[in-house]
Image (tube, grey):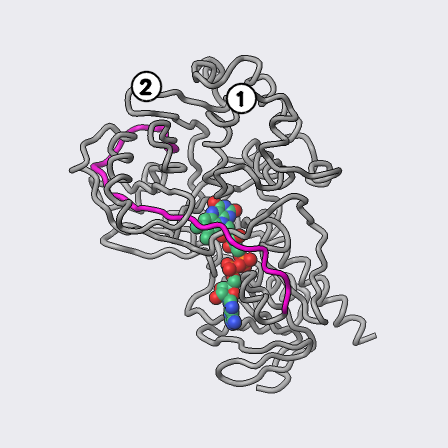
Amino acid sequence: MSDDADVLVVGAGLAGLRAAQVLDAAGQRVIIVDGADRVGGRLSSRRVEGFVLDRGFQLINPAYPELAATGVMSDFDLRSFSSVVRFSDGTSSYELGDPRVDPRRLITSLRHPDLSVSDALKIGLTLAVLRYSSAAQIVRGGDISTRDALRRRGVSSRAIDGVLAPFLRGTLLDDELATSWHYSALVLKSFTRGRPGTHPAGIVALPEALATSLAHASVRLGERVLNVGATGVETDQGRYDARAVIVATDATSAHRLTGVRDPGWRAQSTWWWSLPEQHDTVQLRIDTRRKFLSSALDVSSVARERAPRGCSLIGACANGEFDVTCDEGVREDVARLYGVTTSDVRLIERDTVTHALPVVRPPLNLHQSQVHDDVIVAGDYLQTPSIQGALVSGRRAARIALARLNRSVG
Ligand SMILES: Cc1cc2nc3c(=O)[nH]c(=O)nc-3n(C[C@H](O)[C@H](O)[C@H](O)COP(=O)(O)OP(=O)(O)OC[C@H]3O[C@@H](n4cnc5c(N)ncnc54)[C@H](O)[C@@H]3O)c2cc1C
């Protein structure tokens, strides 16, 4: 296995696939090695009893600029969710939505008991500024926690705890809003620009589309990398030499292989439920009674293919690691949110993802070095914990590798 590649990429998650895509387009010989038996890393889906379940609650925002840059979205069957969110305690409910899509949403949003006119104006102004700011403008200056940043903008504690925290906690996997404001602001900007969605074949369709876009790169699955150096790696099946190595693994594996800092993880648990088919167009629900779930979403309302005929597929998630002892409580929450009886709510499976998102405390640093002891590194933990962050880190790693290869030729 000697001198097989110009660049050896460790990891076929989004970061590794994007790095390979950029290198492939530049005419480099690329080998990607991944210990798993499929591409996609943390993005995976499976079929269970006719339902298509993602591993954890994952959505694709078409407004991510780096996603557009991959070129795979033009043929991608993205099914977007509506921009309406229903806050409900089972008795009364309040719907918040984007007034640009439907002006009536301004009125229904103001019925929310925790949203005063003054808070609505402050939040609306913040979102408008984010929508028209560039990412560079958003991350300029000092960074603080999301909660402190919202307070500084004059948003009341009531609106933060009753509206914004419940809305953001499912995306940030952070109940305290201790996450970097710069990161949250980038997320909010992406919500003002695009409606997140899913694919009829599940989230795995995205890494599979990226892998398909590789014209020449070779992907070797089921091969675990044990040691890495600047010009080669040892795997459980042999050794590869290359002119550059990119370690595009998750943070914990990268720490083991290269010593790069592991920022720690946020966990998420997702319960997948089968309900009798629902015909309501509000897809995202937030429970204001028990406040255990961060959100519940009717996936099959936009991707009918993901549930058998006559059933709806509901994903309900909570931040942290939970086991079987929580199933009955969540069943009751889901029944209340959808106005059905608990006997109508059948558990398909529960996913507990311990290592879901790397922690992002302030200050967010989008300019971290992606070279560690001569090894190039990539992964969401070096940018932002998202599809966008993983893809950007992959592209940056590829550019570093290309500069190195061009230097060695010159
Ligand atoms: C539950 C959950 C929900 C999420 N929700 C969203 C969302 O809604 N929107 C969003 O934008 N993002 C979301 N994300 C984040 C997004 O999925 C990740 O940021 C992104 O997939 C990370 O990609 P990556 O390539 O950096 O890392 P990974 O996907 O972790 O890929 C790393 C790869 O390296 C391989 N590897 C590790 N060690 C070795 C080794 N020693 N040898 C060989 N191979 C190795 C692994 O097998 C893996 O394939 C979510 C993530 C999770 C888990």
Front residue of 106 and 6: 106
Q: Indicate which label's residue lies in the foreground, 2 or 1.
A: 2
> Does the magenta portion include 114?
no
Residue placed at 25% from the left, 49% from the top? 348
Residue 61 percent location from the top left of the image? 52, 42
Residue type for callout 2: Ser
- Magenta span covers which residues? 259-285
Q: Position of residue 238 (x, y in %)?
A: 53, 85
Q: Rate crowding at label 1 as few (under 14), some (14 to 19) or many (20 or more) other CA atoms within 10 Å.
A: few
Residue 331 location in percent, x, y? Answer: 25, 39
- Please state, as top left, top right, bottom left or bottom right, where the N terminus lies in the image: bottom right
Question: Dot 1 corresponds to which residue?
Answer: 100
Q: Is residue 268 magenta?
A: yes
Rendering quarter of residue 243: bottom right
Query: In the image, residue 169 lies at what x, y percent?
Result: 48, 38
Mark found first going from the N terminus, 2 or 1: 2
Residue 14 visible at all: no
The residue lying at 29 percent from left, 25 percent from top is 90
